[in-house]
Image: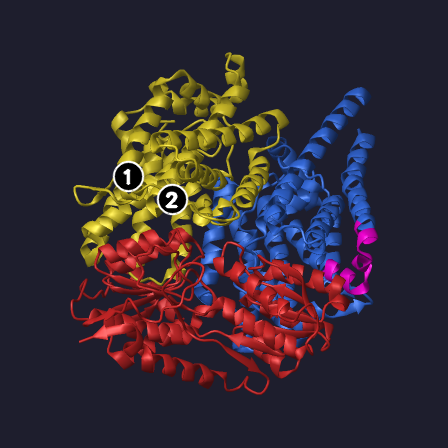
Amino acid sequence: MKTIAKLACALGFGAAALSPAFAETDTKVALVPGGPHPYFAAWEQAGADAMKDFNLGAGDYRVPQKWELAQQSQLLESLLTQGYNSFLIFPGDAVGTNSVVSEIVENGGQAIATAGCLKDPTPALFCMGTDTGNSAYLGTKELIKAMGGKGRIAHFTGFLVDPNTQLRIDAVQKAADETNGAVTVVQVIADIDAPQPAEEKINAYLAANAANVDGIVTTAWVPAVTAANSLRKIGDKRIKMVGIDHDEVVLAAIKDGFVNGTMLQNPYGQGYLGSYVLDKLRHGCTLKEDAPWKSNALTAKFVDSGTVFVDASTADTYVDAMRGITKDILATFEKDYMNCQ
Amino acid sequence: MTDTLHATDNFMPEQRRGSAVMRLALSNELGLAVLIAIAFGAFAITLPGFTSPFSLFTIGRQIGIDTMIGLAMMAVIVTGGLDLSVGAIGVCAAMVFGFLAQKMGIPLPLAAPGAILFGAVLGFINGYTVVRSGVHSFIITLASMSIFFGVMIFLTQAQSFNELPASVQALGKLRVGGMVSVLLLITLAVCAALSIFYRYTVLGRQMLAAGANPRAAELSGIRTGRVIISCHMLTGALAAFAGLMLTARTGAAVPSMAGHLGQDWLLPAFLAPVLGGTLLSGGRVSVVGTLLGATFVTIMTSGLLLMRVGEFWILACLGLMLLLAVLADRFRQQVLRARGMI
Amino acid sequence: MALSFTRIFDNDWVGPGLVSLAAIIGISIFQPSFLSPFNIFVLLSAISVNMVIALGQLVIIAIGQMNLALGAFGGLVAICFVAIMELYGVPPILATVIGLAIGALAGGLTGFVIARTGISAFIITLAGLQIFKGINLGITEAQPFYGVPQSVKDFGNLSMLGPIPWLVLPMIIASLGMWYLFARLRIGRYILAIGGNRTAAELSGINVTATIIWAHAISGLLAAIAGMMLVARLQIGQPTIGDDWLISSFAAPVIGGAVLAGGHVSVAGTFFGVVIIAIITQALVLFAIDPFVVQIVLGGLILWAVGINRLRELRVAKFNARTA
């Protein structure tokens, strides 16, 4: 309803209540995902909270209407025109988004690659996100523990064009290899990004191979939801599963015992911390070159926003756990990563 | 299918009756131009950032790229066909360009024509299959977009070419007079060349004739099969050109730059020529109309984004605009017909 | 003449039917679990939904047009269906009726614009695609609705009899309905007549405008059924439902022998087209084929089907020439 009202007044050409472009003293943060995806829903609250807590000029969550590189670039250019000067961007493409970020920088803005990284060399300040490899590794470890240390694992994951996917496949393999052959990864199904293909392929696989699989690890949102639903449908609690993220379906399946646990990422913390850092950097702080940056396949300037394993005992309190991690990073970020006057 | 007389009229303006002024006043192009002027004026007054040099630069660049995509589709609509694989061809050509320039170290003045030639070859495959099989181009290009894109993804393993010479990205950022994108100027040049091509060259006129009435064209000695194949090749070349412009804008050849299967391009590809008055049944083109169509869509999108309508309603607004535009066009034709001017 | 006509109808589904049978036998030799009850259940669920989607396109192909907005109809109905149940507590039966009404209305409106203005269906449904998808995005802001009632979830999840899912039921009703429509009803004959030769149909006194509106309303109705079936199957009201219908909605009827120019379609052939696509999708997973190759296989499949159809058309033409 709210959006309809917005549309109505905007179409009247009258309500273009824009603040003057480039207010010098204010940090106007825009949080821009690559497209609509439930993972980013927490950014809206994070931006609003950061705006209140740090007195920002803006902390707005703005979503490209479709998951298209051109749409995101056009939205970012428009936001720059609207006077936003600080950006948290999930790169629509690890390479392709660099050019619009360089335009932001050339026009006096700044940007952090958030939740996914841009490939070096990049004009972005740094990359903050889940250490995807580590998260997949820890999740697989938890799964192996639940399986009693031996058995066969199937791995369901996301877009092949997403560079994180390869990191995840490697990390799951690494965790399995450490068991010296007690655990094997029998199949990786990738590129199941939309609900319909995910449903068809995961069910097809389980239908044929449920008896040959002891554990499932999923490292992308949609496959996690679909696999949790499938296990509930089969009614099989023999197959152990560790999912990813905090979709209601996955959390409910954990509470009902069909899924053993899920690796939470920290989207709220990414949005909140990122806004804080961008504001600091506009007001007298600079990034330390010798800060304890981590590196990954894409960039040498990476900050881990944290990951937590949640099982049935913690499924109700996971929000507090994530807030705790966010607080920890916030407490030390200035000291570790920035020089401030 | 199409009424012969009417279709023939469209590309032989000298046969039309009625006053030239009146026809101009009711022409699709003028209507669009007026709409653009109104929209631009309204946005410029109400939206402070809209006319800033950066905003004008990005709008111009977007117009340049979208027009080129629209021209690529227009070139095949001329024959009454269509090409769903424009996006796939554009990305394939961009990746070939990246491969030539980065991996083979071929200088840009050779790599760019090479990529455009490759686009024309892919267009030839489409055209040849359409003509030889007699199956509608919709189905053939539905299959070929899957195949072209699939082979490209398979060969590149979805990896970008991001170490192109710096001049590529510099071209995408180059501004003339502080606010005009060079990409827009390139597109304007291509528009001029295409206008001349359709009006004054034999092949261009044959394309229009074959599109308006294939049987009559055949009877008058035009080898329609060859002409249709050359239309598809022109489409492939223009799509490749658009892919190169997008590469310049991105500074890298990226497999995902036109989305899955290249289908992100389909909307701009159809919107611009159809808004601009290119008949889907073939036989009539409007290069200027395509340019104006892309301009209108880009300005409306930018304005809607700046007005903060809510990103999610932009799609619905664009759809309504398209519907209203074709309805207005239909109304205009009825008026013209009522006055005996068609 | 009558003989050759039945011959075409015979041919239409025999080819794809044989291919389906061969594929099922071939795959089950390599993968015995392919014919396990659960896998049959999964396969039938996928086939059911995709068949209804294909029928939605089939009726428009029959009249010689194309409907790009099919997926947008389905997606809009799907989220409206869940939204009214979640937000207003509408009982599922009533919500289903409302969903069907929305689909038929959206389709009818599209058909009305096409029929009254005479503008190409391609353009109008392209605009319709954006408008209806845009409304969908505007309502949902791309967030899914989770409040699917248990009865609806069960309908998508449970089996009716052995390995046969409940989802088969709407598919059978829709298929029989469409077969009856084309074979027995006047409106079906009108649709085919207009698809075959519009001018001749007009001259023989068929109300073209009304028929086109009917065809599009039926298409919208089928899209609505498919959208709601997907809600039951996915257990969630996803705004992305319908985004990927376009290619398969054309591929299945074309594999099943439909003539894209209109006037000739086969419900049974379309069914086997859907079966072939479903089997191939499954086989690619079962044999762990490089996902990068999947697109190439799908594209090749369409070309293959087109080639077969073309050959058959030539044969039929020869046959007719001989008997005439």
Q: In this view, does A256 lie above or below C80?
A: below
- Residue at 45%, 19% (x, y): give it: B206
**Is residue A17 found left or right of A184 in the rendered image?**
left
Q: Where on the picture, by quarter, is residue C35?
A: bottom right
Question: Where's residue A274, x and y in %?
Answer: 33, 71
Q: Chain A is drawn in which colour?
A: red
Task: Give the Cα distance between marks 2 and 1.
Answer: 24 Å
Q: Position of residue C106 (x, y in %)?
A: 53, 56
Q: Quadrant of the C terminus of chain B?
A: top left
Q: Where is residue C299 in the image (x, y as percent from the top left)?
A: 62, 41
Q: Is A299 on the left-hand or right-hand side of A224?
A: left
Q: For the magenta stretch, what is the residue range?
A: C27-45
Task: State which tag comes first along the sequence, 2 or 1.
Answer: 1
SS assignment at label 2:
helix
| Quarter of the figure with the N terminus of chain B | top right
Q: Which mark is residue B184?
A: 1
Q: Is residue C33 magenta?
A: yes
Chain B as rendered: colour: yellow
Which secondary structure lies at badge 1? helix
